[in-house]
Image: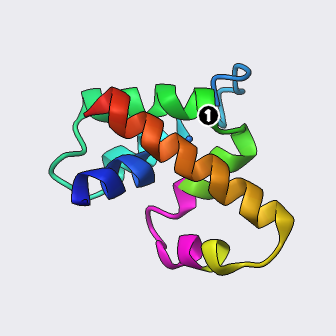
């Protein structure tokens, strides 16, 4: 379970090449986390999955969850369609990252 959470939190869009300022937000957040499983290789992998599964905006939001996981819980409990859609993308991302980066 801890590994899944690490991958899910370390995770974020291969849909388009992000500008340099926005690039690798998930990777940076993953590497900055104090989790022992947050290796450079794993964080790189998680970023690649994030690029496929999440938009740049999603990645920016998810990267903030590394320092404040409560924000993720608030979004999960939200009743808005927009938040529900982000949570669904995030869950898909976490499952993909776990399957690919473990």
Residue at the right extreme, as displayed = 81
Residue on which disc 1 sits? 53
State which region is magenta: 63-73
Q: Quadrant of residue 38?
A: top left
Residue at the top extreme, as displayed = 17
Residue 41, visible in the rendered structure: yes
Q: Quadrant of residue 71?
A: bottom right
- The residue that appears at 65% across and 47% down in the rendered structure is 89
Please say if 49 is above or below 85.
above
Nearer to the camera, 14 or 23 = 14
Residue 49: x %, y % from top left:
50, 29
- The residue that appears at 46% across and 46% down in the rendered structure is 94
Residue 23, visible in the rendered structure: no
Residue 95: x %, y % from top left:
44, 42
In-image side of 72 versus 88 (left or right) = left
Q: Residues within 10 Å of mark 1 (few under 14, many from 20)?
A: many
User: Total number of numbered labels?
Assistant: 1
Say what secondary structure mark 1 lies in.
helix
In-image side of 75 versus 49 (left or right) = right
Nearer to the camera, 3 or 13 = 3
Residue 18: x %, y % from top left:
70, 26
Please say if 41 is above or below 11.
above
In-image side of 51 versus 16 (left or right) = left
- The residue that appears at 27% across and 26% down in the rendered structure is 41
Q: Quadrant of the N terminus?
A: bottom left
Asked whether residue 70 is drawn in magenta, I would say yes
Residue at the left extreme, as displayed = 36
Q: Quadrant of the C terminus?
A: top left
Residue 3: x %, y % from top left:
24, 51
């Amino acid at each position: 379970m801890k590994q899944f959470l690490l991958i899910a939190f370390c995770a974020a869009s291969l849909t388009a090449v992000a500008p340099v300022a926005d690039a690798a937000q998930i990777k940076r957040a993953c590497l900055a986390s104090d989790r022992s499983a947050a290796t450079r290789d794993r964080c790189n992998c998680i970023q690649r999955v994030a690029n496929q599964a999440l938009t740049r905006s999603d990645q920016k939001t998810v990267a903030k969850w590394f320092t404040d996981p409560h924000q993720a819980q608030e979004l999960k409990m939200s009743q808005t369609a927009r938040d529900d859609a982000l949570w669904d993308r995030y869950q898909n991302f976490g499952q993909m990252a776990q399957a690919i980066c473990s």
